[in-house]
Image (tube, helix red, strand yellow):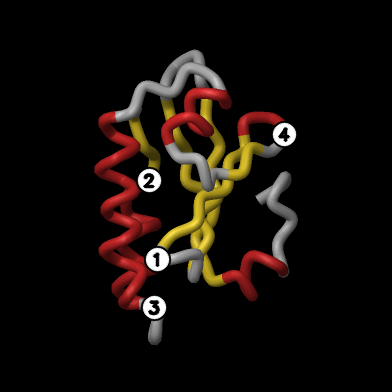
Amino acid sequence: MRIIALSTLKVFGEDQPGHQDAKEPALAWYRHALQADWSAPADVKRDLGSASILQDGRVVFNLAGNKYRLVVWINYAYRVVYIRFIGTHAQYDKIDVQTI
């Protein structure tokens, strides 16, 4: 898979006070996703069972023992993953996951 944009993960883990513990789990997810070949939502669920499949290509991943949430939009036909959001559960609860 091709992932857009790694910088979002790095900035969150490095620049956000108190969230440095998110950096390694986020990069581990990134390395895993790079090697993945997700052609449909079922492939994501089969590969990472804790992923939450939403409408219109949106997927939510739990990171760092479920401390953080990562929201992506996947274009399955082109094998591209767009990072839309990374944050704590409290931050996640304040967004509309379908429009972010």
In the visual, does 53 lie left or right of 51?
right
Pointer 1 or 4: first along the chain: 4
Which element carries disc 2, helix, strand or loop? Answer: loop
Q: Do the residues labelled 1 and 2 touch (CB within 8 Å)?
A: no
Q: Position of residue 38 (x, y in %)?
A: 44, 23
In what quadrant of the picture does the N terminus appear? Answer: top left
- Observer-side mark, 1 or 4, equals 1
Instruction: Answer left or right for 33 relative to 96.
Output: left
Task: Compute the Cα span from label 1 to label 2.
Answer: 19 Å
In the rendered image, residue 69, in percent from the top left (x then y), is placed at: 53, 60
Considering only order in the chain, which callout, 2 or 3, is on the residue closer to the N terminus? 2
Report if the CB atoms under discs 4 and 3 are less than 8 Å apart: no
Identified by mark 1, the residue type is Ala
Q: Marks 4 and 3, Cα distance to the nearest angstrom?
A: 28 Å
Which is more N-terminal, label 3 or label 1?
3
- Residue on which disc 3 sits: 19
In this figure, which residue is indicated by the disc labeled 1? 64
Q: Image quadrant of residue 32?
A: top left
Mark 1 or 3: in front is 1
Q: Earlier in the sequence, mark 4 or mark 3?
A: 3
- Front residue (pair 96, 48): 48
**Which residue is painted at 51% across and 50% down in the image?**
61
Q: Give amino acid for label 2.
A: Ala
Q: Say the numbered circle drawn on residue 55.
A: 4
Marks 1/4: CA distance?
Answer: 24 Å
Q: Distance between the residues labelled 4 and 2?
A: 21 Å
Residue 5: give its label.
2
* Residue 11 place in picture, x, y as percent: 34, 66
Residues under numbered marks 1 and 3 in contact, where contact means CB atoms less than 8 Å apart: no
Residues tagged 3 and 2 counted as in contact (Cβ below 8 A) = no
